[in-house]
Image (spheres, grey):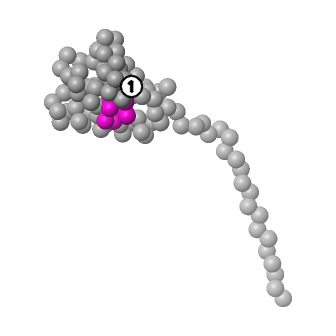
Amino acid sequence: MSEQTDTKIKVRPIIDKEPPRDYKVIYVNDQVTTFEFVCESLVTFFDYSQPKAEKKTAEIHNQGSSVVAVLPFEIAEQKGVEVLVQARNSGFPLEVKLEQE
């Protein structure tokens, strides 16, 4: 005699799960980091065009800081670290902050 067992799987949807939040990547102006370095980092790490990077760099200089990108946390953090490593290797004290959107 063969006995068959039915298995039922219950699936509960996760409804209280929020989508990941975006974070603002903010460059903070200082008196040491060069205009050229900031501009180059925007082109290299955030895919800015040269004219857009120059405009954003002037904004950072004139306003003291500016949002350069809004990205998911992991990407924002990685790009921020890459910029800081490049800045330190070049002898610049550029500060990059992340703020939740």
Q: Residue at x 22, y 25 (%)?
A: 36
Classify residue 56 as left or right of residue 86: right
Q: In the picture shown, does residue 2 fall above or below 70?
A: below
Q: In the picture shown, does residue 29 fall above or below 50?
A: above
- Residue 18 percent across, percent down from the top left: 60, 36
- Residue 73 percent across, percent down from the top left: 45, 36
- Residue 26 percent across, percent down from the top left: 37, 24
Q: Residue at x 81, y 81 (%)?
A: 3
Q: In the picture shown, does residue 37 fall above or below 64?
A: below
Specify whether residue 6 is in view.
Answer: yes
Query: Which image quarter is the N terminus in?
Result: bottom right
Q: Residue 74 in magenta?
A: no
**Label 1 environment density (alpha carbons within 10 Å; few <14, some 14–19, many ≥20):** some
Q: Residue at x 33, y 35 (%)?
A: 45
Residue at the far bottom: name it. Answer: 1
Dot 1 amino acid type: Val
- Residue 40 percent across, percent down from the top left: 27, 30
Q: Residue at x 24, y 37 (%)?
A: 85
| Residue with the mark numbered 1 | 68
Classify residue 21 as left or right of residue 87: right
Q: Quadrant of residue 24?
A: top left
Instruction: Identify the secondary structure beneath mark 1.
Output: strand
Specify whether residue 60 is in view.
Answer: no
User: Count of labels shown?
Assistant: 1
Q: In the picture shown, does residue 88 fall above or below 4?
A: above
Residue at the far top: name it. Answer: 62
Majority secondary structure in the magenta region: helix
Residue at the far left: name it. Answer: 91
> What range of the chain is rendered magenta?
42-48
